[in-house]
Image (tube, rainbow, N blue to C red):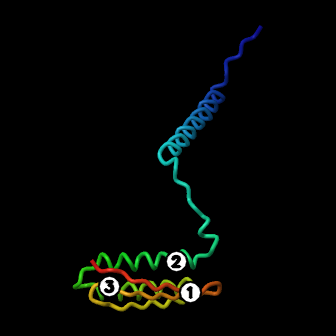
Amino acid sequence: MTFHMPNLSSRKAQFFILTTVVIVGVFYSLSKSINPYSFIDTSRAAYGGEILFFDNVRDKAVKTVRISDSSNFLNNLQTYKNYIEGLAVKKGYNLEFYYANATDDVEINMILTSQKYTLRSNFTVSRP
């Protein structure tokens, strides 16, 4: 009867494989426990980027009006208008963004046209 000593390189390989499995398991467990409820909703993207872009422009226009004080209000709105109209061109859309300032309210009219859609929105935002 002959006894053979296990090969040292086979022990190293087993240790390496075991260590790798443990590390992967730890990272997998951490990723599930850190943010288990975050799922990306891709259903909106199926309608086209135009709708998402248009909604974002509308939301940010409202925020721009609400966070601007009276001294830089018109400058902020004009800067925003220039930025989003340029961004729309880069995305292949045509965006017309108009605003009219009353004493307490701002009326905003937006028209976005693309190959698929023509989207319009007219709304009023109260200034703080």
Which residue is the site of mark 3? 105
Q: Are marks 2 and 1 in contact (CB under 8 Å)?
A: yes
Residue 64 placed where, x, y %? 35, 78
Is 53 placed above or below 40 here?
A: below
The furthest residue to the right = 1
Q: Residue at left 53%, top 38%?
A: 26
Please tell me which of labels 2 and 1 falls first in the chain: 2
The quarter of the picture where residue 22 lies is: top right
Q: Residue at left 64%, top 87%?
A: 115
Is 122 placed above or below 53 here?
A: below
Q: What residue type is labelled 2?
A: Phe
58 vs 40, left or right, is: left
Which residue is the site of mark 2? 53
Please tell me which of labels 1 and 3 falls first in the chain: 1
Q: Residue at left 60%, top 64%?
A: 42
Question: In the image shown, does 126 or 6 lie closer to the viewer?
Answer: 126
Q: Residue at left 57%, top 79%?
A: 50
Which residue is the site of mark 1? 93
Question: In the image shown, does 5 or 80 lie closer to the viewer?
Answer: 80
Residue 19 placed where, x, y %? 57, 34
**Real-space CA distance between mark 3 and mark 2, rounded to the nearest whole angstrom:** 24 Å
- How would you rate the neighbour count of disc 2 (Cα within 10 Å): few for under 14, some for 14-19, many for 20 or more? some
Q: In which quarter of the image is the N terminus?
A: top right
Secondary structure of the residue carrying numbered label 3: strand
Q: Are marks 1 and 3 in contact (CB under 8 Å)?
A: no
